[in-house]
Amino acid sequence: MSDKENDTESMLKALDDFLNHKESSPKLSNQQLDALEHYLDSHAAQNAMHMEVLDGFLCALITSPSPVNAEEYLPVIFGGKMPEFKSQEESDQIMGALAQHWEHIDSVLKRNDEYYPFLYADPDGKCSANEWAYGFILGMDMRRDSWKEMVETGKQDQDGLLTPVLTLYSEYIPEISGCQPIPAEEREELVTKMISNLPRIYEHFEEAREKNRQTSSLH
């Protein structure tokens, strides 16, 4: 291909990207995030997820090859059953924040951009990401069979797309896995890889997800 043809192709691609560009759905405002985080924390006794687990859980559902409808996954967020909201205003606030957070994650990954997860940090500013990985596994478990091939690949291949999640999750349950604590430098690499792999997982399952979406409703 000549330089002129390459230039023409590049211009056409740039034009197509411009015409079809879609902004990401807005992320939660600090006020929305605080309200959702406070609500979940206030229902910890009912085994409601906290924000880091929730974020990993939603990322798994959004990237899943087999969609999970809201009626199925929403009760899991709140510990097994839907909460009794004090008012319609509270219901709208919490359910609206959940829907917006979902749409934000989905829109970022759909554009093949990196989504930076919600992770709690320790007093030294370090993020373990163990509970995010735990949340992701919970989301995978809702459609376990559809993830089976990728899980097996991750166990056998250190460069598997799920390897960082599986490694961080294994550390979360040492009594089961016998996993040793992850060195700080390795953890940082795992978290970085986990983030960069998310859009790749989304893209990997795109065809299957679209096919299954014909008969499934996410919201």
Image (cartoon, grey):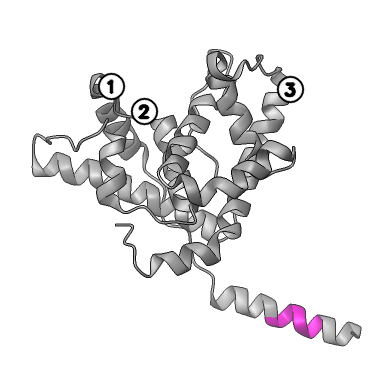
Give coordinates of residue 31: x percent, y percent: 31, 37
Instruction: Quote the CA–CA distance across marks 3 and 2.
Output: 26 Å
Specify which label sits upstream in the sequence, 2 or 1.
Answer: 1
Front-most of residues 145 and 13: 145
The residue sitting at the right extreme is 2
**Horizontal placement of 63 versus 102: left or right?**
right
In the picture, the quarter occupied by the N terminus is bottom right
Cα distance between the residues tagged 2 and 1 = 8 Å
Q: Secondary structure at mark 3?
A: helix
| Label 2, residues with CA under 10 Å away: few <14, some 14-19, many ≥20 | many
SS state under label 2: loop
The residue carrying mark 2 is 50
Q: Are marks 2 and 1 in contact (CB under 8 Å)?
A: yes
- On the image, numbered disc 1 is attached to which residue? 44
- Which three-letter amino acid code belongs to the residue tagged 1? Ala
Q: Which residues are magenta?
A: 7-12
Instruction: Give the crowd class for mark 3: few <14, some 14-19, many >=20 residues within 10 Å.
Output: few
Mark 1 Cα-neighbour bin, 10 Å: few <14, some 14–19, many ≥20? few
Q: Is residue 4 above or below residue 43?
A: below
Residue under label 3, please give it: 185
Q: Position of residue 118 (x, y in %)?
A: 48, 34
Question: Residue drawn 36% across and 37% down?
Answer: 30
Most foreground residue, 160 or 153: 153
Residue 9 location, quadrant:
bottom right
**In the visual, does 182 lie left or right of 170?**
right
